[in-house]
């Protein structure tokens, strides 16, 4: 049975519109990313093992499609790196 984050990823691939910051927080943390608060209008999203996987997350409730697209790509990069290590 897929995790909540895996289900979100699948749903986001189907439609990139209408997602909230909370949805992306659930997605990122479900795949092991950390969300670090910053002083500006965006927080930083980093992976503790794969330091090259980093992006920003705005504090808006509704997000532009570009943030969802970027999140999907980042998770796919993570999965590729993890598969290479196995």
Image: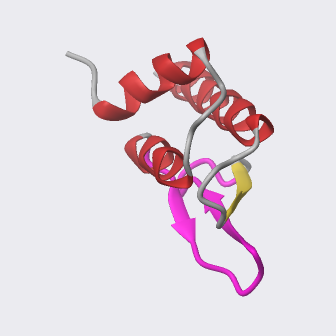
Q: In this image, 43 relative to 20: left or right? A: right
Give the quadrant of the N terminus: top left
How is the model colour-coded? secondary structure
> Percent position (x, y) of residue 8?
43, 28
For the point 65% across and 67% down, which residue is it? 59
Q: In this image, 8 relative to 39: left or right? A: left
Residues rendered magenta in the picture: 32-51
- 64 falls in the magenta region: no
For the point 49% across and 52% down, which residue is it? 25
Q: Quadrant of residue 4?
A: top left
For the point 65% across and 29% down, which residue is it? 17
Give the quadrant of the C terminus: top left
Which of 23 and 81 lies nearest the eye of the viewer?
23
- 34 falls in the magenta region: yes
Q: How many marks?
A: 0
| Secondary structure character of the magenta stretch overall | loop
Which of 69 and 45 lies nearest the eye of the viewer?
69
Q: Is residue 52 above or below residue 13?
A: below
Q: Residue furthest left?
A: 1
> Percent position (x, y) of residue 70?
74, 36
Q: Is residue 54 above or below residue 77?
A: below
Q: In this image, 19 relative to 63: left or right? A: left
Q: Is residue 10 above or below residue 60?
A: above
For the point 55% across and 25% down, which residue is it? 79
Q: Is residue 86 above or below residue 56?
A: above
Q: Quadrant of residue 76?
A: top right
> Percent position (x, y) of residue 12?
56, 24
């Amino acid at each position: 049975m897929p995790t909540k984050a895996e289900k979100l990823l699948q749903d986001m691939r189907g439609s990139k519109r209408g997602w909230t910051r909370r949805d992306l927080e659930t997605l990122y943390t479900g795949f092991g990313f950390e969300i670090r608060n910053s002083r500006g209008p965006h927080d930083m999203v980093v992976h503790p093992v794969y330091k090259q996987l980093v992006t920003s997350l705005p504090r808006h409730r509704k997000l532009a499609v570009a943030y969802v697209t970027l999140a999907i790509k980042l998770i796919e990069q993570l999965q590729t790196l993890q598969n290479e290590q196995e």
